[in-house]
Image (tube, grey):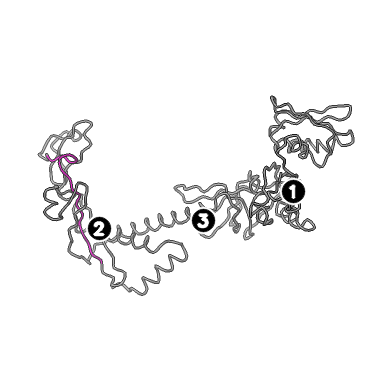
Amino acid sequence: MLDLKTFKSALEQLEEERKIPKEKILDAIEQAMAAAYKKDYGKKGQIIRAKFDLETGKTDFCQVKIVVDESIAIMDTSPRLSPTLGKVGGDINGEYSIKEEGDERVHFNPEHHILLEDAKKIKKGAELNDEIIFPLETKEDYGRIAAQTAKQVIIQKIREAERTSIIDEYGTKEGEIVSGIVQKVERGNVYVDFNRATGVLPAEEQIPGGFFQRGQRIRAYLYSVEDSPRGINLRLSRTHPKFIEKLFAMEAPEIQNGIVEIKSVAREAGARSKIAVYSNDEHIDAIGSCVGQKGTRVNTITQELGGEKIDIIPWSADSKVFVANSISPAKVISIELDVEEHKATIEVANDQLSLAIGKGGQNVRLAAKLTGWRIDIKGDKEKVEEPAEEAKG
């Protein structure tokens, strides 16, 4: 006998812990009961449905037939030679009908279909493809195979509902920063537990020099939610340029509110980044909003990124000004733009040349990525050209 109190409690627990709507679970149970009924008492081709009453614990069963006529069903079911078996074969009624090539009609099955003229006698105004419902006798005794079938249906439907729930939940978080607990580290990949799903932080998406251990809390950028046969995979990154952008949005309310915008980001994860910012309010300093009082905001982000240096420069709609700013902290003497080749030639003082280029060409390389311009830098007397492939990033 079904204990309704215990059953309702289990429903509430599933709804709370696994975020599966109660209606989805009841639907799974009804489909399982219908499958069990059909296994023991039904016929092949029948459409059987069950309706479970949560208040009384009673289950009602019915058979559904689809309304058809000769336009959508082949009515001729006289025995014919089977083209596949090479002998007289048939459907559940021992009958077989050969459809002509290109005929999309279905074979009429009295257990599955009902003729339009007969349907109108039962339901006034019945139309093609309507469903006619016939109540069935309630059964409570099921065999082992039918019970096993019902169990499999319930498990499958609950898994599908849970999968849908996870996709709905984390699909809305795609493109955001998520926080979880390190589950394990295997072959350089970090697996992060999010209670209802597992995220993967591949080795190539990790900041160089980073170290993770089991049980450690970690934040990462969720760039993809994948529905695979093995489950839901959350693809994470800590090297993505959007990660640094979202970190600033979390630290600076002005960015979160849209007053200050991050127009562009160029990043070499673990080493150095450049971000271009712009204020939509002339009374609010874009750079100051990102830096914070005594550098608290930018320092918090630098610590999160393992000491990665961050240059914050003002964005400008004027390409000359923007490119000149991007070379910061070096000071620009003059700048020339070649629009056709999308190339900028910058002149700096000789003592600023190494600063403008940066260690290993890092500063000018990041500036090129940030602005989208190829940048050549020259001193007062000599010129150093950045390789095209590096400038384009």
Whichever of callouts 1 and 2 sits on the residue coming sooner in the sequence is 2
Q: CA distance from mark 1 to mark 3?
A: 30 Å
Residue shown at 43%/54% (left/top)? 164
Instruction: Compute the Cα span from label 3 to label 2.
Output: 33 Å
Q: Nearer the viewer, residue 127 or 76?
A: 127
Say what secondary structure mark 3 lies in.
loop
Residue 97, percent across and down?
Answer: 15, 37
**Mark 3, residue position:** 197
Q: Which residue is mark 1?
A: 308
Spatial separation of the CA atoms under disc 1 and disc 2 = 61 Å
Name the image quarter holding the N terminus: bottom left
Secondary structure of the residue carrying numbered label 1? loop
Relative to 393, is 376 on the left or the right? Answer: right
Q: Tell me which amino acid carries mark 3.
A: Ala
Q: Main secondary structure of the magenta part?
A: strand
Is 240 inside the magenta-drawn segment?
A: no
Q: Which residue is mark 2?
A: 49
Q: Quadrant of residue 334?
A: top right
Determine the secondary structure under disc 2.
Answer: strand
Which quadrant of the figure has residue 156? bottom left
Q: Position of residue 157 (x, y in %)?
A: 37, 56
For marks 3 and 2, the one nearer the N-term is 2
Query: Horizontal and vertical percent for residue 102?
Result: 23, 31
Question: Would you place residue 55 above or below residue 120 in this image?
Answer: below
- In the picture, residue 257 is in which quadrant? bottom right
